Amino acid sequence: MVLVITRLRYFSTFLILLFIAAVVAATSARAGAGSKSKADEEAGAVLFRDKGCAYCHGTGGVGGKKAPNLSGLRTNKLWPADKITNQIMNGGQKMPPFSDSLTDAEIAQLVAYLRAKQRPIPPPLPTPPPAPGN
């Protein structure tokens, strides 16, 4: 009887730890913690430019009249990846939420870009074709 109770305790402890590990893994994946590749950083740079982030935060995130400088986020311990993710998704203060207009992958790429040691510069926009008759 004592052996059965001991085994049940170990099993329930194991299940609790397994559940906690699954929650942490899901949260990390959502926060883009694994999105640190150069490709993700470069994609994030293009998104930052093309999705309008630069309109408020300035080119390269150096700050503007409408929004703060983001260039120090990489080393700011008050802004880990999960908090940046939450800010992008839900907005706050003057920032609108973007959870309806960005996918989880795009948010992870933006976080990778914002936390990059050396932020990539997005490639130039393609030049539009000349207008007909010119």
Image (cartoon, rainbow, N blue to C red):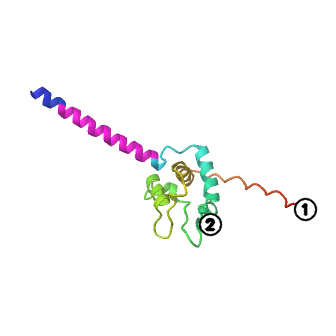
Residue 111 appears left or right of 119: left
Q: Residue 130, image x and y in percent?
A: 85, 59
Q: Residue furthest left?
A: 1
Q: What's the amino acid at mark 2?
A: Tyr
The secondary structure that most of the magenta stretch takes on is helix
* Label 1, label 2: how far apart the Cα atoms are: 33 Å
Residue under label 1: 133
Q: Secondary structure at mark 1?
A: loop
Label 1 is placed on what type of residue?
Gly
Residue at x 47%, y 46% (from the top left corner): 33
Name the residue that disc number 2 marks. 55
* The residue positioned farthest toward the right in the image shown: 133
Q: Residue at x 26, y 35 (%)?
A: 14
The magenta segment: 8-29
Q: Residues within 10 Å of mark 2 (few under 14, many from 20)?
A: some
User: For the view shown, which residue lies furthest in the front direction?
Assistant: 132
Q: Is residue 31 above or below residue 92?
A: above
Density class for disc 1 (Cα within 10 Å; few <14, some 14-19, many ≥20) is few
Q: Quadrant of the N terminus?
A: top left
Q: Quadrant of residue 128?
A: bottom right
Vertical placement of 8 versus 64: above or below? above
Going from N to C along the chain, the mark reached first, 1 or 2, is: 2
Residue closer to the observer: 93 or 76: 93
Q: In the rendered view, would you say 36 is above or below 60?
A: above
Identify the disc placed on residue 104: none
Identity of the residue furthest to the bottom in this view? 65
Which quadrant, please, contains the C terminus? bottom right
